[in-house]
Image (spheres, rainbow, N blue to C red):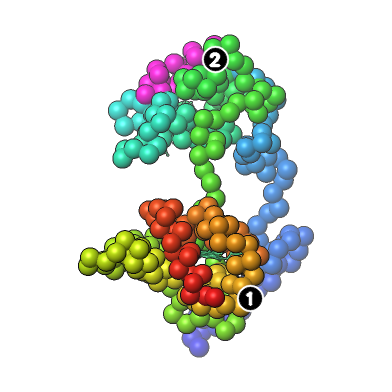
Amino acid sequence: MSSLSRLCGVVCLWIISGSLAADGDRTGYFGIGEIATPDQISGWDIDIRPDGQGLPEGEGSVADGEWLYEAQCAECHGSFGEGVGRYPVLAGGQGTLSDGRPTRSVGSYWAHLSTLWDYIHRAMPFTAPESLSDDEVYAITAYVLYLNDIVDDEFVLSKDSFLSVEMPNARGFYRDDRPDVSNVRCMQDCLVGALVVHSSVMGFSSQQADVLEPESEMSAESERLAKAKSTVESLCGICHTSGIGGAPIVGDSAVWQPRLEKGLDSLIDNAIQGYIGDAGVMPAKGGFAHLSDEDVSSAVEYMVDQSR
Ligand code: HEC
Ligand code: HEC
């Protein structure tokens, strides 16, 4: 060890132990940092929740919002929320979400009013974030709603009227129901090489299903059966061959017996509509939306036949 590092060994230890002693009143593992004061926390704790939790007292009308918006927002977002240049559009686009190029605006896309209040309060105007008073945020938010035809020109937004506003796309979001998000954790005797089901696998499988479709001149009935067989083997089988996520295994008559007692029709219904049972989640049509009701119905018949 060089004399320099030996010196550091001594000096550094002395510095560390000195600082530990001096900061003995500080908590935490290393004696560093400071405990945030309630004042400091309140500066950061400004989020608003969808149920209105976190909103300050105050109010603002569409009429007040109009001139505030013109003065502070229109230069970038346009007088009608149409967006100037490449600045974001704030209004319009209703009904475009399924288009190739959807317009995702407050009116067409946003699910919660709290997001709008919070965004404006926290981040806008772009060059002077957090410069607006609470009443100004209420007023400008009300005006952006008005630009989207969500409220009328008499509307006053406040903590109390907040929950009366219904965002057009409030019901447009739903829980991710793709099969791979509802898998059950496996801790023991897990399948080796089990297929992970995600969209690319599905895309591949559905093509495969088309390829497997017979082209010979079979009777309509045998063609239907062959198609059912290939649907079950290549698509439904992703879960129902190995039992992923609790799916009843095709051919295992013991697990199918109690299900058969419900009657074929209710099994078919559950396969088409989707179904959550004690064993797991059966996604609607197994997650393969392109299958027709008849395809699924034949697939269930085939499964049941193989499992008696
Ligand atoms: C100098 C230009 C400018 C001004 C002025 C301005 N904004 Fe913005 N605004 C932006 C930019 C840029 C973004 C996108 C920021 C990002 O994506 O990080 C944005 C984003 C937004 C969004 C989110 C849009 C979306 O769909 O994601 C809202 C809402 C918004 N601004 C409202 C306002 C309001 C209300 C005002 C006036 C108080 C305002 N802005 C003033 C530039 C501006
Ligand atoms: C992502 C996995 C998965 C895929 C893919 C899948 N299933 Fe299922 N299926 C399940 C699970 C899990 C259950 C058991 C649900 C329960 O009872 O808790 C189930 C149950 C069923 C049942 C029994 C329903 C009842 O009421 O008892 C039928 C019938 C069925 N699936 C048919 C199909 C068909 C037909 C396909 C293909 C089009 C398919 N499944 C694709 C996971 C899947």
In-image side of 275 versus 144 (left or right): right
Asked whether disc 1 touches disc 2, contact meaning CB atoms under 8 Å apart, the reply is no
Label 1: element kind? helix
Q: Position of residue 183 (x, y in %)?
A: 54, 67
Residue named by callout 2: 152
Q: Position of residue 272 (x, y in %)?
A: 50, 54
Q: Residues within 10 Å of mark 2 (few under 14, many from 20)?
A: some
In-image side of 198 versus 12 (left or right): left
Q: Find the residue positioned furthest to the right.
A: 25
Q: Is residue 129 magenta?
A: no
Q: Find the residue positioned furthest to the left.
A: 216
The first of marks 1 and 2 along the sequence is 1
Residue 248 vertical position relative to residue 133 in the rendered view, above or below: below
Q: Residues within 10 Å of mark 1 (few under 14, many from 20)?
A: few
> Residue, x 48% and y 65% (percent of image)?
301
- Taking depth in this image into account, of 109 and 60 the one nearest to the observer is 109
Label 2: element kind? loop
- Taking depth in this image into account, of 283 and 144 the one nearest to the observer is 283
Q: Is residue 74 magenta?
A: yes
Figure quadrant of residue 30: bottom right
- Taking depth in this image into account, of 274 and 5 the one nearest to the observer is 274
Residue named by callout 1: 13
Q: Which residues are magenta?
A: 61-82
> Residue, x 49% and y 72% (percent of image)?
305
Q: Position of residue 269 (x, y in %)?
A: 54, 54
Classify mark 2 as within 8 Å of ligand 1 or not, answering yes or no: no
Quadrant location, the C terminus:
bottom right
